[in-house]
Image (cartoon, rainbow, N blue to C red):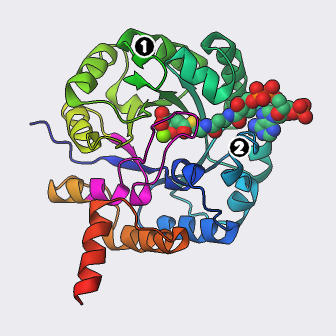
Amino acid sequence: MHIPKHVVLKEVGPRDGLQNEKATILTADKVALIDLLSASGLSYIEVSSFVHPKWIPQLADAAEVLATIKRQQDITYAALIPNKRGLERALTVGIDEASVFMSASESHNKNNINKSIHETYPVLREVVEEAKREGLRVRGYISTVIGCPYEGAIAPQKVREVADALFTMGVDEISLGDTIGVGVPTQVEALLAHLLPHYAADTLAMHFHDTRGTAMANVVKSMEMGITTFDSAIGGLGGCPYAKGASGNVATEDLLYLFDEMNIHTGVQMDRVLAAASFIEQKLTKPLNSKQMEIKRHQEVEQ
Ligand code: HMG
Ligand code: MG
């Protein structure tokens, strides 16, 4: 089995997690969550999203959150950016990395960002070019890389077409999203076998939602194939409101357990991550959906 010495965990909970929660989380609580995450050893936090506030009201306070968090020099603070207007809003408060996003499936793209795939390219190109002029790194998300809630199975060739377009625009990294968590390791293998001859493994990240409990198996398969960057969300929060059936991301603390026990270095401290998870669990007033948090709750009852 191919085991890397190090992997990078990219925390998307404050964005992917909180965009999908019905409960309103106070801006001060979002800031406190991000500050706790900043103290855990994570090197990358996706803080919020500058999409249209009518589409994602939960993250309408993105600018205020970014303006208030205590930033640490060695951490990349990123935000989701759909278009030029979103980038303008983000630049007023400052971000380290802009994450543009689109889908490999036509119908999810239309439902999520109100454009066809071809109409999306010039919108994202404008963002990438402007972000680069501002000296930012740019990440490109591709959603529905294995399955789409409207179209079913997605062929790896479709993902390749979008990946080619994004890399040609100048994105530094592509995060491949199993948005609705339908993928299994054989499909991940087919997808990566199609992409890896064309792109360096360290320019790809995997973003698994765990709707059907297959995310962990998919992470291990991706790692065996040379991928070393994984997105995850504290407490297994997450989901895309414009992808029916999408549920949480693989939980940061569960991935961390896996990497720690396999002696794969992440630089992230479990106790600090659990402290952040407990904090947001209390604010959401519901038990978080991760194995590590389940164990923690049991231990607390026994004490
Ligand atoms: P639209 O309505 O087509 O936008 O929305 P438009 O360009 O036609 O503009 C309409 C009006 O909105 C204009 O105002 C714009 O200025 C304004 P008017 O001139 O009429 O007064 N506007 C904005 N205002 C503030 N901020 C902006 C902005 N953009 C336009 N950024 C748009 C298009 C993309 C904006 C909309 O569809 C949208 O915000 N969609 C976001 C949906 C979303 O956030 N989905 C979840 C994130 S993706 C995800 O979760 C998947 C991921 O995790 C990976 C995975 O799991 O696969 C990343
Ligand atoms: Mg997602």
- Is the CB–ligand 1 distance for label 2 below 8 Å? yes
152 and 102: which is toward the camera: 152
Q: Residues within 10 Å of mark 2 (few under 14, many from 20)?
A: many
> Is 152 left or right of 77, judged from the image as shown?
left
Q: What residue range appears in magenta?
A: 229-256
Q: Residue furthest bottom?
A: 303
- Is the CB–ligand 1 distance for label 1 below 8 Å? no
Q: What secondary structure is found at the residue carrying circle 2?
A: loop
111 and 126: which is toward the camera: 111
Quadrant in which residue 299 is drawn? bottom left
Quadrant in which residue 68 is drawn? bottom right
Q: CA distance from mark 1 to mark 2?
A: 26 Å
Mark 1 or mark 2: which comes first in sequence? 2
- In this rendering, the answer to whether 271 lies above or below 97 is below
282 and 226: which is toward the camera: 282
Residue 62: mark: none
Q: What secondary structure is found at the residue carrying circle 1?
A: helix
Q: Which residue is mark 2?
A: 50
Quadrant in which residue 43 is drawn? bottom left
- Indicate the quadrant containing the C terminus: top left, top right, bottom left or bottom right: bottom left
Task: Estimate the x, y position of residue 54 in percent, counting from the top left.
Answer: 76, 43
Residue 160: mark: 1
Residue flagged by tag 2: what amino acid is it? Answer: Phe
Residue in view at x 16 percent, y 59 percent: 261
- In this rendering, the answer to whether 300 lies above or below 208 is below
Residue 83, can we see it? Answer: no
Residue in view at x 46 percent, y 68 percent: 286
> Is 151 left or right of 86, judged from the image as shown?
left
Is residue 21 shown in magenta?
no
